[in-house]
Image (tube, helix red, strand yellow):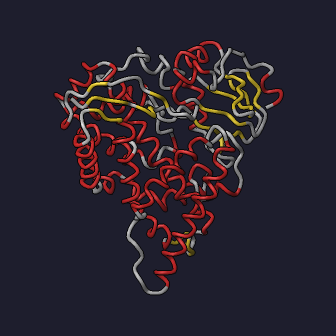
Amino acid sequence: MGESSLNAAQCPYSPTDPAVVDDPFPAYRQLRDECPVHHTTMAGIDFLTIAHRDDVHAILTEPNFWVNRHGAGIAYSGEDGRGNLQHYDQPEHTKRRVLMRNEFNPLEVRKLADSTRALAVGLADEMESAGNEAELHDDFACPLPILGFIDLMGVDPGDRHLIKAWADQLVLGLSDPKQAVKPTAEIKAYINAAVSQRRRIADEGGTPRPGLLTEYSLRLLDGERIPLIEMESMVLQLLVAGHETTTSLVTNFMWRMLEDTSRWDRIVADHSLIPNAIEESLRYDPPVLGLFRTNVEETTIRDVRIPAKSKVMALYASANRDPEAFPNPDEFDIDRDEMQLKRHYSFGWGIHHCLGAPLARQTARIAIETLATRFPTMRANGPTERLAPEILWGRRKLPVRLR
């Protein structure tokens, strides 16, 4: 990062400070007020942290200047990112997004509602049969989107725990690239084999296992099948983005409901409050605290000089608590105005807005409706524990009493 830090105000901020890991939002408030452009170090890598909503918005809405080709994580990615939508800039980004978006548009997503509800009811049955105590992350919020992803992709259900282990390790790599090396190689080999098998079956006149993995394996891009190296990254991105963030959305939501049970009692009594409450949860507790962009040319933000090709972290979570956009931003308000909530950045913004947002919202809504119906008197049952990756925000442990 070099000279870029010379005129950046420096607060005593580190994303790995135990106090910040435990509760980053007071630190974000200080960054907005005193150090909106901050020279930060994590995992031995220097970058700039951008905390003010206006600056985050400017970065996300100038995709030809703040590019994704070097990766959305802390490390500079190269060819290994091909296939991942977070790796592409225009015009390649739109071409590949169009390739995938039909399966994730709201009309198609609605067709998955019944199967998602059946999975949620099945998991609730298992929790209930096991007794009055449950671990809401492990027993419900985590397996629900993983099982849904496996169904959607047409992956062997027997590989559920293998995929979960890989996904857990991959998210650690967003803030510490070394953690992702081994699982990335393993899951890419798995995807490569699965895609090759499906193509071989189709080429021999057979019918491969149904699901999006087969759809994408046989789909054409510029008249040819998608290269294997791109298929590996594409499916890998769907796996990580498609399960971890939805799990955290559910656990964060329930954490705040059970933190103040009057909120939960309102949800139980009136399910129509759930969609707005989900948006407030996304604003208040975004599953991804921020992601990275890289500038193609030297620029300045708030008089701080930023050399070309600098890694810059746009702090979604800080933008979501900016009082200029959200009155009383540190208050969780189920009744917050819908127009305010449309301004949150938890699914990104602009051309890189999360492709799976409709599916995440629907899965979370069904999950919460199921819990509210089956366990209306659910209560917290001990301390929670947060996810390990500093770039993510969710409950890794959420013990509850069902009645």
- Whether 225 is drawn above or below 45: the answer is below
Q: Residue furthest left?
A: 269
**Quarter of the image where the N terminus is located:** top right
Q: Residue furthest front?
A: 131
Residue 73, percent from left and from top: 63, 41
Q: Residue at x 33, y 40 (%)?
A: 364
- Whether 152 is drawn above or below 165: the answer is below
Residue 31, percent from left and from top: 61, 17
Residue 55, percent from left and from top: 60, 27
- Whether 361 is drawn above or below 109: the answer is above
55 horizontally vs 271: left or right: right
Q: Residue at x 49, y 84 (%)?
A: 203
Nearer to me, 76 or 240? 240
365 horizontally vs 158: left or right: left
Q: Residue furthest bottom?
A: 204
Q: Residue furthest right?
A: 3
Q: Residue at x 49, y 47 (%)?
A: 241
**Quarter of the image where the C terminus is located:** top left
49 horizontally vs 21: left or right: right
Residue 309, percent from left and from top: 75, 40
Q: Residue at x 73, y 42 (%)?
A: 296
Nearer to me, 80 or 176? 176
